[in-house]
Amino acid sequence: MPVVRFVREAREVVCAAGANLRELALAEGIQLYGLKGQLGNCGGCGQCITCFVEVVAERVPRSLNLPTPVELQKLRRRPEGWRLACQTIVFDSIAVVTRPQMGRASLDAAVAAAQAEPLPLVEVAVEPVEEEGQEEQENGEAPDDGL
């Protein structure tokens, strides 16, 4: 399972592959918004451009979905590496800076440390789920179809 390293907050959060970055951050109590975003965010539609983050490290290339057309249009004048959290799907481990427009100079050391430390991928052991009737089939008995 991917790990999202939130650099500003000094937190690592494990998530399912395919998780939406905005939803993950909000569920974990991580502040994505400055004052403007708190007052008028669009709720995850990509229209207000207040949930941007800077992706500072990826465990492997393509750890995220490609930027959406909305992102390409809304972030065309923003630095490379900035994404809208609401449009970003996490497939593998990443490190991000939330609210990159605020107080970035004080984060340089934390960003360098986050980039230097390898990003983990949490392995989850999945136990097989026995379906109803599977035990009877293994014992040579026919499953009861209820007919």
Image (tube, rainbow, N blue to C red):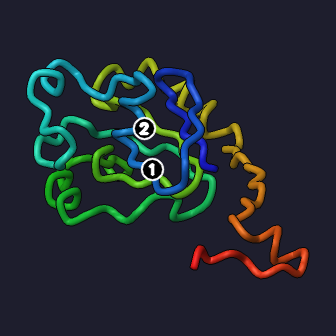
At 18% from the left and 56% from the top, the residue drawn is 76
Q: Choose top left, top right, bottom left or bottom right for residue 37.
A: top left
At 39% from the left and 48% from the top, the residue drawn is 20
Q: Whole-percent x and y of residue 47?
A: 11, 47
Q: Please determine whether, in this image, residue 49 is positioned above or below residue 63.
A: above
Image quadrant for the C terminus?
Answer: bottom right
Residue indicated by mark 2? 24
Measured Cα–Cα span from mark 1 to mark 2: 7 Å
Identify which amino acid the numbered label 2 is placed on.
Answer: Leu
Q: Residues within 10 Å of mark 1 (few under 14, many from 20)?
A: some
Q: Choose top left, top right, bottom left or bottom right for residue 116.
A: top right
Residue indicated by mark 1? 19
Q: Please determine whether, in this image, residue 4 is positioned above or below residue 140.
A: above
**Count of labels shown?**
2
Q: Nearer the viewer, residue 51 or 114?
A: 51
Q: Whole-percent x and y of residue 101?
A: 28, 30
Pointer 1 with pointer 2, Cβ within 8 A? yes
Q: Which of 69 and 24 is in front in this view?
A: 24
Q: Please determine whether, in this image, residue 136 is positioned above or below residue 56.
A: below
Q: Please determine whether, in this image, residue 124 is positioned above or below residue 14.
A: below
| The label number, if any, that marks residue 73 in the structure image | none
SS at badge 2: helix
At 41% from the left and 62% from the top, the residue drawn is 65
Q: Nearer the viewer, residue 42 or 115?
A: 42
